Image (cartoon, rainbow, N blue to C red):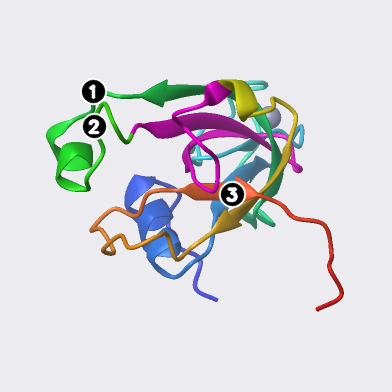
Amino acid sequence: MANPPIHDHSYRQFLRDKKLMGSRCTGCGAQYVPPRDVCAACHEGTMEWVQMRGAGSLSAFTTISIGTPATVAEGYDRNNPYCCAVVALEEGPRVVARLQGVDAGQPETIAVGAPLELVWESEGEAVRETPTLVFRPRVAESGA
Ligand SMILES: [Zn+2]
């Protein structure tokens, strides 16, 4: 794979290719998603790309009933709120993402700590110029 410079444009291009990429400091090992080109921990190491598996757990969330014009256009409103989450990736970094597969109208049913997985095909949504990270609850292996 090519090794593009570490910045947001490259990050978004990786997302369009269905890869969640971060940067890792070769000096201290700190990882960042979205990627940073300078390590905030040691300010010394050089940064390299590292791919995230796309698994994590729910760290925090909020439900949004009054969204932006873009989310309103997607059909979200007071009667159909959506859930915005902070996801702790297994590799360590935390990312902000849309949380689907939960009942945003009943936030008491959404459990912090729940295992999540990254999904690329979101429910009925058009592919955006800048893809939105979407996670869903990770279901146990059913053997199917
Ligand atoms: Zn570092």
Determine whether, in the image, residue 46 is placed left or right of residue 79: right
Q: CA distance from mark 3 to mark 2?
A: 20 Å
Q: Position of residue 37 (x, y in %)?
A: 48, 38
Foreground of the two, 10 or 71: 71
Residue sitting at 55 percent across and 54 percent down? 21
Question: Badge 1 is on which residue?
Answer: 66
Q: Is residue 72 above or below residue 117?
A: above
Residue carrying label 3: 136
Helix, strand, or loop for circle 2? Answer: loop
Q: Residues within 10 Å of mark 2 (few under 14, many from 20)?
A: some
- As shown in the figure, which amino acid type bears the numbered disc 1? Ile
| Left or right, 124 with reference to 77 | right
Q: Which residues are magenta?
A: 81-107
Pointer 2 residue: 77
The residues bearing labels 3 and 1 have C-alpha atoms spaced at a distance of 22 Å
| Residues tagged 1 and 2 counted as in contact (Cβ below 8 A) | yes
Asked if residue 48 is positioned above or below residue 62 in the image, the reply reads below
- State the image quarter where residue 72 is shown: top left
Secondary structure category for the residue under label 1? loop
| Tag 3: amino acid | Arg
